[in-house]
Amino acid sequence: MLRADSGLLSYPIREVVEIGKEIEKLGKFSMIWENIGDPVTAGEEIPEWMTTIVRDVAASSDAFAYTDSRGDVVARQYVLDHFSSHKVCTIDDILFFNGLGEAINKIMNYLPKEARVLVPSPTYPSHATAESMHAGCSYISYALDPTNNWEPDLDEIRNKVRYNDHIVAILVINPNNPTGSVYTRETLEAIVQIAKEHDCFLIFDEIYHHMTFNGVDNTLLYEIIGDVPGISMKGISKDIPWPGSRCGWIEVYNAEKDDNFAAYIKVILLSKMLEVCSTTFPQKVLPLLYEHNEFKGLLQSRISKYTKRANEAFAFFKQIPYIHINKPKGIFYLVVELPNLPRTTLDAKNKATRLYINQLEEQPLVADFQFSYELMGSEGVCVVPLTGFGSTVTGFRMTLLQEDDAVFTETLEKIGRAINAYYA
Ligand SMILES: Cc1ncc(COP(=O)(O)O)c(C=O)c1O
């Protein structure tokens, strides 16, 4: 019953939770969950004006109906007018999905098996996993360079695209999860140029387009794409924030300029028609939330909070020898690199926890996975190992979402203690 390639399926951001829950139960303590990018689970209050809008929309019959397969026409017009560009996109080029997770799967799966998408390393795991599952083998990646603010290695992209005819598309995640970097316009323009020269299309995951820290410029794909075919991915999980809505969309640019690309996009639309449509409700709510006069203020205050957290975490980790860190320019994640990570154990909360972790460590384990288990068992903090994002660099990603100042400081201290003990 098991597909031969099912071993390629993995999503470490959630898999680590299963292990964390067991450690929490055995150790009889409350874990600090630093693994998942969900502001609501992390404790952000949803303001009353938002819940009122949601309640009002739920009271209208329209919200109970199917909608267009492309998505609700008002929502599509709204995102076209506010987040996209009439120069490269029309209302029919916008397709709604049940979260970008679904869009990612469809975009990868409906390519022919031998047509490959070049993905970043590290990457948001859904992209890499969906790409591998569609190809039936490991994904092909380009490095993000930690010594250059995690900017993409342009030479590697150029060489991979030049010497591998199977690569038909380049994926860029900007602003970037997991690194928190925001790429320079020059870097992004260079990637567009490579795609143009080598007849590739572009996939830009721009779900964090609203989430850059003050003073950081964010270049969007539609500003620089010229006549190259491309897809921008956006959604409401992070900025509104409403991850549980499962609502995201793609904007298709320049489909008419390439018959192959246009035919492939049509297949994606047909696959959506087969399901009738994505969930109507969040699409009805979307323009009302973004248009509300309190939305901008709310977004701004959240960004200020993440900036403050990023500054504190950066200053804290900077003092610790052994490790390397880049200051994020946006979103709510922080990557800490742990180079030359030794293999060791830390004092676990109790014997039952120790025995459970020992059992986990009997399997072949990448060094940063071992570190994350030891951190959970000793200090009670759950982070995601960086190699879980397809990185060759060991380390971890934590979030900047903690609502409570004192708990955030305490979390940093706990992680710092574990790092110092580990390297010592
Ligand atoms: C870069 C990136 N793309 C896509 C997603 C998935 O978004 P959605 O909630 O719309 O499925 C995430 C979620 O964390 C993400 O970080």
Image (cartoon, grey):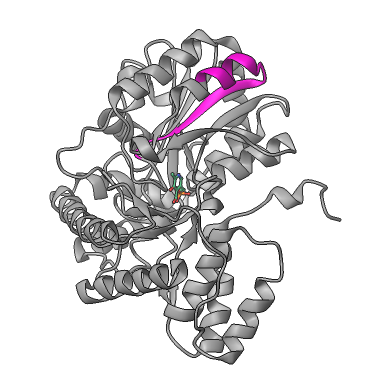
> Taking the image as drawn, is residue 121 in sight?
yes
Residue at 51% of width from left, 18% of height from top? Answer: 158
Q: Would residue 141 be counted in the magenta stretch?
A: no
Residue at 66% of width from left, 28% of height from top? Answer: 111
- As drawn, is 259 to the left or to the right of 326? right
Q: Position of residue 242 (x, y in %)?
A: 36, 56
User: For residue 159, what is the image quadrant?
Assistant: top right
Residue at 52% of width from left, 66% of height from top? Answer: 371
- As drawn, is 114 to the left or to the right of 12? right
Q: Specify the farthest residue to the front.
A: 424
Q: Position of residue 297 (x, y in %)?
A: 13, 52
- As drawn, is 80 to the left or to the right of 167? left
Q: Is residue 25 above or below residue 197?
A: below
In front of the other: 381 or 11: 381
Position of the C terminus, as image quadrant, is bottom left
Position of the N terminus, as image quadrant, is bottom right
Q: Is residue 53 above or below residue 413?
A: above
Residues rendered magenta in the picture: 158-175
